[in-house]
Amino acid sequence: MRKNRKSFDIGEEPLGMIRGHDIELYLNMEKPYPPILRGPAYTEILENSKKIEKHINELLDIALIRNIGHNQIVEGTTPVLITWHVGKSRLCADFIALNNYTKADMYPITRIHKALGNSAKVKYITKMDFIKGFCQNGVKISSMKLLRIIWHMSIPKCHLASRVNQTIYKG
């Protein structure tokens, strides 16, 4: 990595962030919606529906999530309850439909020095892929609204179609 350190943007030398080559994202937010974005809601087994309803009511009670009306605009994506085999679950955002309309290689990933800083306290690292995905492409200001994720009391973002669960940051 030291030999090829100029390949990565470390803040002072934005080699990967070439001005004028910013990515501009387009998402059809007008009716009619693309077929994949207007699909049916996720179905759940009947025996699990009571557990899910209880879990949702608990999240509503502690104001972690909120009910919205059908005419309210929401800047986000479909929330999904991911259940684990141990009976626990977590709430995250489903980006599968959105990923079908964006280029995988141009998805903004955290800069190399932040990724290394975040992994400094881990005990074991199975694999770190520095070649794939670290494109460091800039995103136009007008397109940043499509990437914005609103965090309410630290609800995690889950990028289901990606290998790495990253946090999109402003910068």
Image (spheres, rainbow, N blue to C red):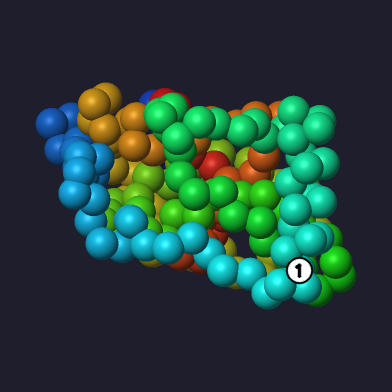
Residue 56, given in percent of the width and then of the height, sits at 74, 46
- Residue 17 lies in quadrant: top left
Quadrant of the snapshot with the C terminus: top left
Q: Residue furthest left?
A: 20
- Residue 64 lies in quadrant: top right
Residue 80, given in percent of the width and then of the height, sits at 59, 55
Of residues 98 and 58, the one nearer the viewer is: 58
Residue pointed to by mark 1: 48
Of residues 57 and 63, the one nearer the viewer is: 57
Instruction: Say if residue 98 shows up in the picture.
Output: yes
Q: Residue at x 86, y 70 (%)?
A: 86
Mark 1 crowdedness (10 Å alpha carbons): few <14, some 14-19, many ≥20: few
- From the viewer's perspective, tell me whether residue 134 is left or right of residue 69: left
In the rendered image, the vertical position of residue 22 relative to residue 37, given as above or below: above
Residue 54, given in percent of the width and then of the height, sits at 81, 51
Q: Residue at x 41, y 29 (%)?
A: 71
Disc count in the image?
1
In the rendered image, the vertical position of residue 121 relative to residue 151, given as above or below: below
Q: Residue furthest right?
A: 86
- From the viewer's perspective, tell me whether residue 83 is left or right of residue 166: right
Asked which secondary structure carries label 1, the reply is helix
- From the viewer's perspective, tell me whether residue 108 is left or right of residue 169: left
Of residues 121 and 24, the one nearer the viewer is: 24
